[in-house]
Image: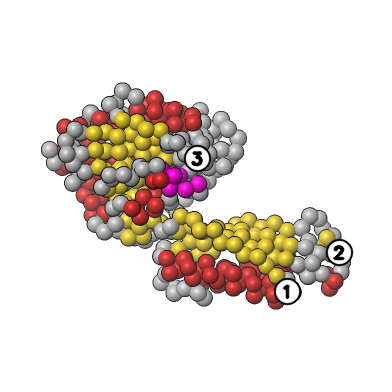
């Protein structure tokens, strides 16, 4: 049976699972967990997968879940991934399923990713006659800066995998819309720290000190200016100073000032250029104020790069199972980062974005991912369920 023939059935089957998808999403949203250790989320996933005839393996270094659905017929192994972890953020939008933990919130849609992937597993388990080979469901902790995909790769999640696919929900897109592109789709993300070392003293006598605060201020300005003077205007890269600390009170000049931030780029040359220039700008500004500095750059996620032909494949699947116009080509990559990039370094595949803007907001002004007010349109999840299933069955 062709994907075109399955299309309406997939959409109908996904919609029939709406109640299950929403229930699991809300249960995970209500009980968010951080980092690599997500035992409650792991339990919710394994319970939801029980009885589907899957071969389930639990992670050793993390609380990951890998579930294989074998058709019993020779063919490729397709991996579908959903990340599981929340963010260290206080949720401020009231609901019956608001986070029960202060300072933890599913503000990036990972709760929807898990729920959609579980429902896709249910749908595909009922469609074993429609595919050959194997489908592997990858439920991954630690996407939010903890490199969870690397841990799972080290434990063999990609062994025998021929193609991989992931979905990421975004509120700042029309609800239900699917988009992606070939090539770079998300940025690299590196962390930098700079400590300005000066000489402290009384705030009434700055001439007796080497004040690190003006040095820090000029360094921040210099870093932001440096980007536009280091890379071509047609290239994508940025440096953001997001956290600064200095001093203890109003009448003491501190002996040091500290800052940290992020470096983002869509290609390795731009990434390396910005990494190198962080130290140059910091050292020059510190010296101009009679200070010294220590700079450290910690490499983070690489650029997320979709393989050639993936835009056409996702467009074909989306339009065939949801109707013409479900897919809109992505005009440019975004500056967010993803550790699905590690998966795509090893096997062909892609990530696509799903619009989940609430009905009572406009996608251009909706509370974005990582906001304390972030909400999702749960009706859009059926499109994600159908897309996961369709991407497993195509080809």
Question: What residue do we see at 66% from left, 70% from top?
Answer: 218
Q: Which residue is mark 3?
A: 36
Which segment did they paint magenta? 146-152
Q: Which residue is mark 1?
A: 289
Residue 285 on image: x %, y %: 66, 73
Residue 130 on image: x %, y %: 17, 35
Q: CA distance from mark 3 to mark 1?
A: 42 Å
Question: What residue do we see at 33% from left, 34% from top?
Answer: 67
Residue 166 on image: x %, y %: 34, 45
Q: Residue furthest left?
A: 1
Nearest the viewer among 291 and 316 is: 291
Question: What residue do we see at 36% from left, 43% from top?
Answer: 156
Q: Are marks 3 and 2 in contact (CB under 8 Å)?
A: no
Between circles 3 and 1, the one closer to the viewer is 3
Of the numbered discs 3 and 1, the one sitting upstream in the chain is 3
Nearest the viewer among 157 and 192 is: 157
Q: Is residue 162 magenta?
A: no
Q: Which residue is mark 2?
A: 202
Q: Does any portion of residue 32 appear in the rendered image?
A: yes
Q: CA distance from mark 3 to mark 2?
A: 45 Å
Q: How is the image coloured?
A: secondary structure
Left or right position of 202 against 348: right
Q: Pointer 1: residues within 10 angstroms few (<14), some, or many (20+)?
A: some
Q: Regarding mark 1 in the picture, which secondary structure is present there?
A: loop
Q: Regarding mark 3 in the picture, which secondary structure is present there?
A: loop
Between circles 3 and 2, the one closer to the viewer is 3
Q: Main secondary structure of the magenta part?
A: helix
Residue 330 on image: x %, y %: 33, 57
Can you say whether 190 is above or below 57 in the image? below
């Amino acid at each position: 049976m062709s994907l075109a023939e399955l299309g309406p059935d997939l959409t109908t089957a996904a919609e029939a699972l709406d109640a299950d998808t929403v229930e699991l999403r809300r249960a995970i949203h209500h009980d968010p967990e951080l980092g690599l250790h997500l035992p409650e989320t792991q339990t919710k996933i394994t319970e939801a997968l029980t009885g589907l005839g899957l071969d389930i393996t639990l992670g050793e270094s993390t609380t990951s879940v890998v579930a294989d659905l074998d058709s019993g017929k020779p063919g490729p192994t397709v991996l579908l991934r959903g990340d599981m972890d929340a963010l260290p953020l206080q949720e401020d939008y009231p609901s019956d399923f608001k986070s029960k933990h202060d300072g933890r919130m599913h503000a990036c849609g990972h709760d929807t990713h898990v729920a959609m992937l579980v429902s896709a597993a249910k749908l595909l388990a009922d469609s074993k006659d429609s595919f050959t080979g194997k489908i592997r469901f990858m439920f991954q902790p630690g996407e939010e800066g903890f490199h969870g995909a690397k841990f799972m790769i080290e434990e063999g999640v990609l062994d025998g995998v021929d193609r991989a696919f992931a979905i990421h929900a975004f509120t700042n897109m029309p609800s239900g819309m699917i988009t992606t592109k070939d090539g770079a789709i998300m940025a690299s993300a590196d962390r930098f720290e700079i400590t300005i070392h000066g000489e402290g003293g009384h705030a009434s006598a700055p001439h007796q000190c080497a004040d690190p605060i003006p040095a820090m201020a000029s360094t921040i300005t210099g870093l932001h200016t440096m980007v536009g003077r280091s890379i071509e205007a047609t290239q994508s890269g940025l440096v953001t100073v997001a956290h600064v600390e200095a001093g203890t009170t109003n009448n003491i000049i501190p002996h040091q000032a500290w800052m940290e931030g992020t470096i983002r780029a869509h290609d390795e040359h731009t990434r390396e250029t910005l990494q190198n220039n962080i130290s140059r700008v910091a050292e020059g500004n510190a010296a101009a104020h009679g200070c010294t500095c220590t700079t450290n750059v910690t490499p983070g996620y690489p650029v997320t790069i979709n393989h050639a032909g993936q835009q056409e494949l996702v467009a074909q699947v989306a339009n065939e199972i949801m109707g013409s116009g479900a897919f809109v080509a992505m005009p440019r990559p975004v500056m967010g980062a993803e550790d699905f990039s590690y998966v795509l370094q090893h096997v062909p595949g892609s990530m696509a974005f799903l619009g989940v803007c609430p009905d009572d907001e406009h996608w251009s002004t909706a509370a974005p991912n990582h906001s304390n007010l972030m909400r999702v349109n749960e009706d859009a999840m059926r499109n994600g369920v159908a897309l996961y299933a369709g991407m497993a069955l195509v080809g």
